[in-house]
Image (cartoon, grey):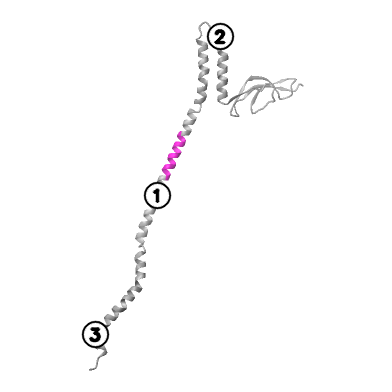
């Protein structure tokens, strides 16, 4: 009996194919695994959308916080300007009290009125000092256009541009002129 090569059972071929397929399957497996582990475009898009929504939420929160800080700062500035004079006003209350006490005296004599006015002036000077309000009394000083306002020029024996008369004292607050002193300035004799 001669065996026909074509008469071999087909199972042999299948088994040899099956034997070859585990190797082939294991060879293809890393590629299939790489493809399976790599997210699909839809998944990548979904993750990007989630991340974008997260960043948008963080941006909105930061923007809201910035607006709150800006609003609070504006309120603080408004309160500071509104109540900036509060300390100085508190210092002026004793001045008013002394004036009222002076006026409340029945049958005041000239001496009592003078004492009341002197007390009031001391209280006012103390309030000015605490408020950093400094008097500008430039009598005999060289004319300074930043602190003085010349009302007239008069001939004098003093050097030219010297303050010879003070009509009204000036005031500075923390080094800044609040009101210039009104003065008469000397000029050279002709």
Residue at the disc numbered 2: 112
Of pointers 2 and 3, the one earlier in the residue sequence: 3
Mark in front: 3 vs 1: 3
* Occupied quadrant, residue 168: top right
Give how far apart the Cα atoms at labels 2 and 3 are.
Answer: 142 Å
Residue at left offset 51%, top offset 17% = 96
Tell me the magenta residue range: 62-75
Q: In this view, does 119 lie above or below 175?
A: above
Viewer-nearest residue: 117 or 41: 117
Q: Do the residues labelled 2 and 1 touch (CB within 8 Å)?
A: no
- Residue 176: x and y in percent read 60, 29
Q: Residue at x 26, y 88 (%)?
A: 6
Which residue bears the numbered disc 1? 56
Tell me, yes or no, whether the highlighted magenta stretch contains residue 93: no
Where residue 9 is drawn, which disc sits there?
3
Closer to us: mark 2 or mark 1? 2
**Residue 83 in the image: above or below residue 63:** above
* Image quarter hosting the N terminus: bottom left
Left or right placement of residue 31 versus residue 181 in this view: left
In depth, the one of 27 and 171 nearer the eye is: 27
Q: For the view shown, which residue lies furthest in the top direction?
A: 107
């Amino acid at each position: 009996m001669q065996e026909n090569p074509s008469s071999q059972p087909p199972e042999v071929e299948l088994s040899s194919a099956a034997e070859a397929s585990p190797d082939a399957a294991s060879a293809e497996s890393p590629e299939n695994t790489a493809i399976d582990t790599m997210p699909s475009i839809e998944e990548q898009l979904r993750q990007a959308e989630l991340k974008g929504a997260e960043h948008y939420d963080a941006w909105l929160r930061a923007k809201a916080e910035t607006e709150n800080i800006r609003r609070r700062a504006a309120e603080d500035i408004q309160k500071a300007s509104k109540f900036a004079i509060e300390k100085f006003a508190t210092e002026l209350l004793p001045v008013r009290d002394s004036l009222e006490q002076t006026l409340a005296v029945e049958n005041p004599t000239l001496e009592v009125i003078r004492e009341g006015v002197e007390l009031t002036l001391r209280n006012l000077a103390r309030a000015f000092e605490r408020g950093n309000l400094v008097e500008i009394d430039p009598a005999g000083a060289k004319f300074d256009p930043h602190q003085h306002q010349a009302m007239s020029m008069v001939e004098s024996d003093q050097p030219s541009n010297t303050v010879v008369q003070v009509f009204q004292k000036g005031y500075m607050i923390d080094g800044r002129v609040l009101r210039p002193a009104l003065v008469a300035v000397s000029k050279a004799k002709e």
